[in-house]
Amino acid sequence: MASYLVNFLKSTFSYNSSYWTNKKTYSLKDGLEGLTDKETKLASYWNTPFNKICLGMKVNSFPTSWTVIDHQASSLFNLIKDGNFTLTKVGISAWESLVAYASRWLENEYRGYDEGFNFYNEYVYARIGFALSTKCKAFVGFGTAFRNGEDKLSNITCGYALCKWKTTKFAAFGYILAQ
């Protein structure tokens, strides 16, 4: 069942949004339509135990790309609400599979990485995400914020970025489904 549908064009589900840490639905009617391009947050976010999270990203006109995180929790809300980091171990290939052309970036930049729920380091913050360990070289995530080369905090509600000489961002429409 869908827990979240995240529109990158809006800041509704940015990293600091209270929707990650509260039990309020958002645009309930839109969530009952299925997998559309309309933002929503359903009660399944806090009342559905799961063994897997399915993550999807749709970038521009590319088809939606999907990956699965095997993780057990009483709800996505309980996993995220307190802001504590929870490690995932899906690996770089799973995160790459979410984004069009990301593997070109990540394979060239790979020097170690971190991934998980409530992930953060000095440069990147994500409610669900992955980041290369050195500075802000590259990241993929849902509910993300990052410090760019000018040390300014920027948001990408859902998507990925490469922060090298200049910041290149690709925003996506995100799907977060609990199973």
Image (spheres, rainbow, N blue to C red):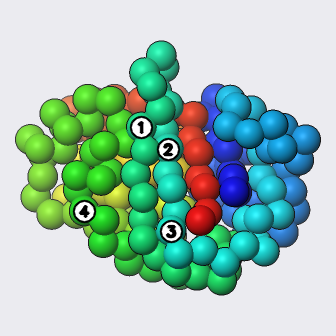
Position of 78 relative to 90 (above/below): below
- Between the residue at mark 1 and the residue at mark 3, the CA separation in whole angstroms equals 16 Å
What amino acid is labelled 1 in the image? Ser
Front one among 47 and 154: 47
Question: Which residue lies under the disc numbered 1?
Answer: 65
Image quadrant in which you'd find residue 98: top left
Q: Secondary structure at mark 1?
A: strand
Asked whether residue 84 appears in the rendered view, the answer is yes
The first of marks 4 and 1 along the sequence is: 1
Q: Residues within 10 Å of mark 1 (few under 14, many from 20)?
A: some
- Between the residue at mark 3 and the residue at mark 2, the CA separation in whole angstroms equals 13 Å
Question: Which residue lies under the disc numbered 2?
Answer: 56
What amino acid is labelled 3 in the image? Lys
Q: Secondary structure at mark 4?
A: loop
The first of marks 1 and 3 along the sequence is: 3
Position of 16 relative to 64 (above/below): below
Q: Quadrant of the C terminus?
A: bottom right
Measured as percent of width and height from the top left, residue 8 is found at 60, 34
Question: Which residue lies under the disc numbered 3?
Answer: 52
Q: Residue at the location (40% across, 31% down)?
A: 169
The first of marks 3 and 4 along the sequence is: 3
Q: Is residue 71 left or right of residue 178?
A: left
Q: Is residue 3 left or right of residue 161?
A: right
Residue 91, disc:
4
Measured as percent of width and height from the top left, residue 149 is found at 32, 41
What amino acid is labelled 4 in the image? Gly
